[in-house]
Image (cartoon, coloured by chain):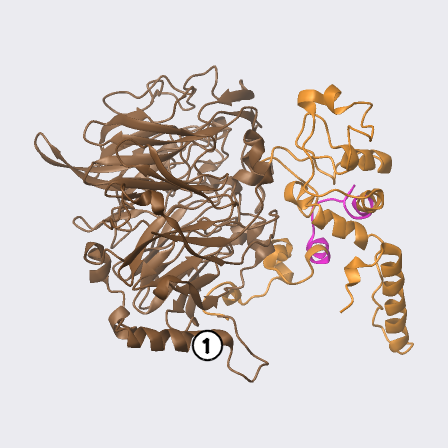
Chain colours: A brown, B orange
Amino acid sequence: MERSSGHTKVSPRVGLLAVAVAVAAMMGTPVSAADEVTPERLLNVDKEPGNWLHHHKDFSAHRFSSLKDINRDNVKNLKVAWTMHLGGVEGGGIWSHGGLEGTPIAENGFLYVTDGWGSVYKIDAHGGRGNLVWKMDPKTDHDWAGAVSCCGVDNRGVALWGDLVISHTLDGRLVATNKETGQVAWQRTVADPDKGEVITGAPLIVKNMAITGVAGAEYGIRGWIAATDLTTQKEVWRTHTIPGKGEPGSETWKDDKSASASGGGSTWVTGSYDPTTDTIVWGVGNPGPDWDNAYRPGDNLYTDSSLGLDASTGKIKWHYQHTPNDPFDYDSVAENVLVDIPGPSGPQKLSLEADRNGFAYAIDRTTGKFVWGLPFVKKVTWTKGLDAETGKPIEYDPNKSVQAYEASVTPSRTNMETDICPGNMGGKNWPPTAYNPELKLWYIPVIESCNHIKVEVSDQNKLKPREFWTGGGPSQNVKITGSVTAIDVTTGKIAGKLETPYPNLGGMLATPDLVFTGQPSGEVMALDAKSLAKLWEFNTGGGVNAPPMTFSVDGKQYIAILVGLGGAWDKWFIDSTPELKKMQPGSMLYVFAL
Amino acid sequence: MMNFNALPTTIRLLFVSVIALNVSIGFAYGQSAQPPTADPTDAGKAVFKRANCMGCHKWHGNGGGGYGGDALSLRKTELTRDQIIETVSCGRPGTGMPFFVRGAYDEVKCYGMTRQDAAALMPPEGGTFLRPKDIEAVADYVLAHIKGAGDPSYAECVAFFSNASRVCDIYKTASQKPDDASAATGKSQ
């Protein structure tokens, strides 16, 4: 909360709040107690179609809204309703500026958004305009966190619980802010930047817990997923994504130098939750050092895996690993989309994941067994394909401790410079997919890419706190483009692909007959949900680096999206898209309506 | 309000030394307090930050591999002052080290090459252009504080960032660390 200390008059923001509350009361909008976000409401978000209560819209991570006042017939009339400039553009650590990657949360006509440094903004969206109710600035330690955030000054948004707004800061805190006043109610340190840990993801609220993931696999962390009890503010469980000595999976680290202690396995994208089995499904990132896989012989569990966790205990129920002994930086941090599909012997309970390695996977989320997989990018060079039975890359040899995959292109100690496709940003990075449960189409925001990798042989002496631990690095020698690729989940086949001039760095929103997305060159667009034909486009003039969402207030549907190019792209990958060098740092919320 | 940083370096230095003089007069003779002394390379440190040298070489200058490619260690560099000035001005062809002089490889000669000669080896353009005086200042800062230095220390880190951030905590020796671990946890604030 920004304070007005030193001034005797009431701050304008408090005045705004008073007005907002008064207006809300007059309009009969439920306030305070009625706005408590309960576990029941979080389980039944379908009953509140005008709201967007979870980071991924629902526990299944569909990012599908049933709102259809904006539809295929009228979307061409979509116009800017209002905008709001936000802050957080300033730099820190190794970063010259912050960016916006967040998904707004909407509840009863109020939006909650974050900027890259973790400030939370509550915005009253009633009356066809946006009014800032309060801003909570957590005073993130810029240099401490910014020096060890590999891939940008990012914060992907908040969650709601009770009368609190729950958020993370890059410097490792979980912050609970009073929803009405904007005052910090309490905060708790979850991650430690002294170890290279930072937090960029939005929290997932499951029952009375906030689930937190961590970033830092490029700095030699040992990854984890942690649950904080929001009533006691204490940690309930913390599950490391890399097993400790003697635990199941530790046998997949076969080296003699404790590589697992700094083995990576970040968890920086918000997961999903299946209440019927009380299972949290969460993706795990790359092993470290990224490109020197001979340093860490073995499959390196649970890096590059999807995990099913018992929500009450954090115990790992099942895992599915996509790229064992990964030499490519092919994280599996992506959100897992939980989908039920009619099958020959009853409904199939699937978990869908679009992996950095360029393949889309469906696994059985009750057992963790592979169901189908296919490449969703145009070009894959690191493997000839997936084994139809196991889904493992066909070159994978469980008897080998260091995997070579397609050896002519795979980075290794004998192939120190090489080009790989997809490039190390992956076929899809963190930007979320969306799933239309009516059409059973799954929309992937794609980076169509290759890049150049140089391997550096790692040794223990190079492992230092807060210093890069990557065993090499990428550079950009070819142009990178993008696409929106739709997969028919009933067949596991590609149903359509709309190619775009630039990589998709923002993610997807699905509505009954439309798909919304953006481009880092500034465009926000609406596509036909079936044909992917472009039906509407607006150029925001800033790089789109965040997913669109939709909500309704006063009976009217709106589309909202944060705009401000930051993240990894414009520092590390910009040479593959030289035209984007002209995009200026910015920080702005766009809201569209008919 | 006067913008101190907008003043020319020489005038700024003059100011700083006058202030330092005043302060030293303010302390009575015989007191042990050390008067703050102006570091003539502070201007170069400001350039090091402003031109985002620290974005790849890090505050300590050791650089290192990682996403940004492999920024060379300025601590271990063997470059002379003139060579540092040339490298900052013209970048390093074929690497990610940008050039920071306006017109490099066009009207300003770099390694005897034009933009056409450099072709695919053309280094990237810096995020900001620097004047020759700025480049000399940053070279002098590197020579005075970074080149030849050993492992980064807590004192160096605090000198760089001042005390506003926890960025330096990991360089503290055991005796410098607070025994109250709660500083890093719990509900402070």
Residue situated in front as seen by the camera: B73 or A167: A167
Q: Position of residue A229 (x, y in %)?
A: 32, 63
- The answer to whether B50 appears left or right of A366 in the picture is right
Q: Quadrant of residue A432?
A: top left
- The answer to whether A108 appears left or right of A295 in the picture is left
Q: Quadrant of residue A372?
A: top left
Q: Which residues are magenta?
A: B141-159
Q: Secondary structure at mark 1?
A: helix
Q: How many marks?
A: 1
Q: Residue at x 41, y 74 (%)?
A: A17
Q: Which residue is mark 1?
A: A14
The local crowd at label 1, few if under 14, some if 14 to 19, many if 20 or more residues have their Cα within 10 Å, is some
**Can you say whether B126 is above or below B43 in the image?**
above
Q: Position of residue A285 (x, y in %)?
A: 41, 39
Residue situated in front as seen by the camera: A231 or A79: A79
What amino acid type is highlighted by mark number 1? Val
Q: Position of residue A411 (x, y in %)?
A: 50, 23
Residue that extends furthest to the left in the rendered view of this protein: A345
**Which chain's residue wears label 1?**
A
Residue B146 colored in magenta in the image: yes
**Can you say whether B17 is above or below A280 in the image?**
below
Residue that extends furthest to the bottom in the rendered view of this protein: A8
